[in-house]
Image (spheres, rainbow, N blue to C red):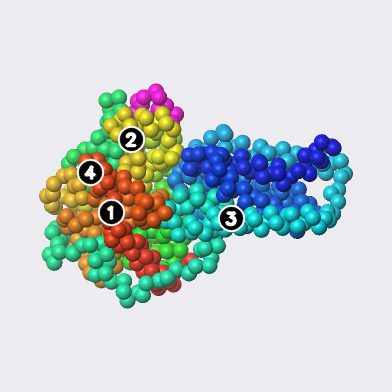
Amino acid sequence: MNTVNKLLSRRFVLFTLVLLLKSSLAWLVVFGGGANLRMALTEIPFFCAVFCLIEIFARKRQLLYYVIANLIFTALYFTVLMYYKYYGIIVTYHAISQADKITKVKESTYSLLQPQYLLMFVDIIILLVLLVLYRSKGTRAPQLRLKPYRKAALRGILAVSIALCMLNVWPNRASMNETEQAEEMGIMNYEVFTLLSDSTQKAQLIDSKEITQAAIDKLKGIVPPQTPQYRGAEKGKNVIVIQMESFQSFLIGLKVNGVEVTPTMNRLAAGDFYYNHFYTMVGQGTTSDAEFTVNTSLYVPEHEPATQNDVNKVLPSLPKLMQQNGYTTATFHTNDVQFWNRKELYQALGWEKYFDHSYFGDEDHIAFGASDEVLYKKTAEQLIRMEDAGQPFYAQVISMSSHHPYNIPREKVTLDIPKKLNDTLAGRYLEAQNYADRALGGFIGQLKSSGLWDNSVVILYGDHQGLPVYALSKAEKSSLEEMLGHPYDYKDMFNIPLILHAPGITYPAVQPKTGGQIDLLPTIANLTGAPIDNQIHFGTDLLNAGSTPSLLPMRHFLPRGSVVSDTGIFVPGAGYEDGTPYPFAGSAADSGRVSLEEFNRTLSLLDYSDSYIAQLPDRTDAE
């Protein structure tokens, strides 16, 4: 035990070195570089400050406090790298507060785990064993009394460590790019900074009187036409909106070993209106955020899912608008309505009915509920009943089988993927989307045979990205590049399809106009003749967008200030000046960069939306 005692007596240095190794792993995954001077200068002072506090104030059980601190640091580093693997951003306390969702998506979480990540916890297991052995010998740690010179030294180290932490944080506090900000500050400094800054800074709300539709249109740079094209062209027709899980645009037309991955979507894209520059606009709530944005034409919150707080407000919405114009409304999802607080979301949006797990059951289980085949079969039965009632309806259908990590039962897999993609995220994704497309084809067939297809506006779009570039191996990226003919990056990751089937109008098939999920409400309202002059909306009617430049602010998955334009995606650095453009194919090398004036307008749009929602009346029917 003497050796153990000597080892543990050097805990200050030992624990610092151990945590330095763990931070190196986190930095390697997140920033692409392991141990380096910047990492040491940003992470070590934080460790030292905490350990000095333990040494100065803990007279008993110092080792226990070291172990607890080590466990907390380890858990944070582990959470940071796991979160980054899927979301591509640095996790903060906002996301950690939603940790209960992990138990519901544990399969997705486990799929991101690599064996080397578990090395972070080896020392903790060893320390716990040593502590048990130490205590089993009946040894009791004596109460420590710091000698004056040692106390002075510790206070000096503490002062220097805190000063270094401040020097890392202060110059970078205004940076817009959260990932770069965390790299400059250090991960631990960044976590504390976000916690303290959010708790001390109050949001400055824009006066509700200033938030008018005219002001929003001016920020977007649009002038709505006096007589919109196709106004009421589909009045009285049903509206069926199909939200497709994790579906990205690059799948349209893609072949693997000479076989179409998504033949149903390919046929729809060729025969109806296909918007090939359409983008996801979700945040932390992913699928539920897509439901929120599509049905409100409002931007999602910056640091939390829309279903956390925004659903407590009296929201203007598409279901309410359609009901005011003689429609019945219903939404369909095979998951439990409690997940992502959807019960509150659906009440806030004003859906008359929702059909969830209690209706679809657990038949043919895939992912979190009944398969897409069951979803579409039982949904079609309900839609036919709604049609027979003699009143037009608005229905939203949420697919789910192709959910990350894309584990489709082998008996349902029919796509023959290249061997190098076997049992990879990219390979499973292609298999899952091929299955989802097959199930969708059955649904379209039911709509056509029942006559609903010819009496309905049908809209299909992806909810969010399915293949995070951060989670792909080099081999997967190489395979995707071979398939696509260009490197897979942000432009592919956030690009989702929008297909519009409107039987009463004729329009060029492929629409190059840039749009996003926020644009669906005004587009549907125009087609059905539903008036929205008195309803605040941040989207643009895509059928009347014309040549007006598009500006789509992005949140959560990209740094604040990121924007999709007609020429590319712009991602800011510390600010606008050092931002990076990702130009679309065929555009000039720097064409993805928006002007400073456009950049500031997109930030204002987000502020307007946040302020508008914050000042809406609270719901009185909230449970």
Compute the Cα span from label 2 to label 3: 38 Å
Compared with 276, 623 (above or below) is below
* Mark nearer the viewer, 4 or 3: 3
| Residue 587 image label | 4
Compute the Cα span from label 4 to label 3: 43 Å
Residue 502 forms part of the magenta stretch: no
Compute the Cα span from label 1 to label 2: 22 Å
Reading the image, the residue beneath label 2 is 487
Q: Amino acid at mark 4?
A: Ser
| Residue 594 image label | 1
Where is residue 4 shown, x and y percent of the image? 80, 38
Compared with 609, 294 (above or below) is above
Reading the image, the residue beneath label 3 is 165
Label pair 2/4, CB-CB below 8 angstroms: no
Q: Tell me the element at label 3.
A: helix
Upstream in sequence: badge 4 or badge 3: 3
Q: Tell me the element at label 4.
A: loop
Compute the Cα span from label 3 to label 1: 35 Å
Which range is magenta? 410-424
Q: Amino acid at mark 2?
A: Pro
Upstream in sequence: badge 1 or badge 2: 2
How many numbered circles are shown? 4
Where is residue 217 shown, x and y percent of the image? 24, 65
Compared with 171, 278 (above or below) is above
Q: Tell me the element at label 2.
A: loop
Q: Amino acid at mark 1?
A: Val
